[in-house]
Amino acid sequence: MVERVKTGIPGFDEILNGGIPKRNVVLLSGGPGTGKSIFGTQFLWNGLQLGEGGVYVALEEHPVQVRVNMRQFGWDVRQFEAEGKLAIVDAFTGGVGEAAKKEKYVVKDPDDVNELVDVLRTAIKESNAQRVVVDSVSTLYLTRPAVARSIVLQLKKVLSGMGTTSILVSQVSVTERGFGGPGVEHAADGIVRLDLDEVDGELVRSMIIWKMRGTAHSMKRHIFSITDKGIVVYPEKVLKTKRYFLVSE
């Protein structure tokens, strides 16, 4: 039996045969506005409701803004932070600014992956985290694409080794056919791609699971929406597009 972690995202666990296999590191790729950060924070919030500690690594947004964004969906994490069940790692400000000085977990040099890993380890231990979201991992190698795979492997070693099930958010351009960096698709255990396509003059959100080690999954592109309660996936609604990707193990 595969031990699974239920994301709690309506419809998603269904197309994944019950959830993400435990300890998997999943690359969540997509262009701007596709809902990647919402997916990640919803995954953490649902874990907190089940008593599972979580860590959110903020690389592209101020931790204060992360909390504000979550509250828009009714996910108020302040109590969980106070109880030590959720850790938000500030890898954005470098500790600069009055608000940043109040943060518990701060990466002084966001470009230093080793420092990030050290702070991440501490945050996982102290929050007893079972779920981790890094948003976005591509920030770490944006100017150094040659090291993309090695950085993802380094994170995977730590995250899987500490028993967490993790989502690495990966930024791609609207027209990009890959997943956010050379070789990263080989390093990750799973790949979920979120897209926003114009269909008959209307923007439609869809997702597809490209791979997921340890489980069978839907091979179809499913339509999803972003509601005032977060992401909802519609397993019965399939979008047919002319996208062509190639991914190998």
Image (spheres, rainbow, N blue to C red):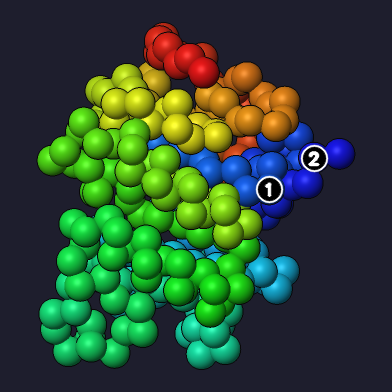
Note whether 156 is above or below 243 in the view shown.
below
The residue depicted at 38 percent of the width and 42 percent of the height is 152
Note whether 98 is above or below 244 in the view shown.
below
Q: How many marks?
A: 2
Name the secondary structure under disc 1. Answer: loop
Q: Dot 2, how many residues are within 10 Å of its Cα: few (below 14), some (14-19), or many (20+)?
A: few
x, y (%) of residue 105? 35, 78
The residue depicted at 46 percent of the width and 39 percent of the height is 27
Quadrant of res 172? top left
Note whether 99 is above or below 152 in the view shown.
below
x, y (%) of residue 23? 63, 48
Circle 2 residue? 2
Q: CB atoms at circles 2 and 1 under 8 Å apart?
A: yes
Note whether 18 is above or below 236 in the view shown.
below
The amino acid beneath tag 2 is Val
Q: Is residue 38 visible?
A: no
The residue depicted at 62 percent of the width and 63 percent of the height is 130
Q: Dot 1, how many residues are within 10 Å of its Cα: few (below 14), some (14-19), or many (20+)?
A: some
* Residue placed most toward the observer, 212 or 249: 249
Quadrant of res 127? bottom right
The residue depicted at 64 percent of the width and 36 percent of the height is 234
**Which residue is most to the right?**
1
What is the spatial separation of the Cα atoms under label 2 and label 1, in whole angstroms? 8 Å
Circle 1 residue? 22
Q: Is residue 107 visible?
A: yes
* Residue placed most toward the observer, 211 or 64: 211
Q: Is residue 214 left or right of residue 170?
A: right
x, y (%) of residue 174? 26, 29
Q: Earlier in the sequence, mark 2 or mark 1?
A: 2
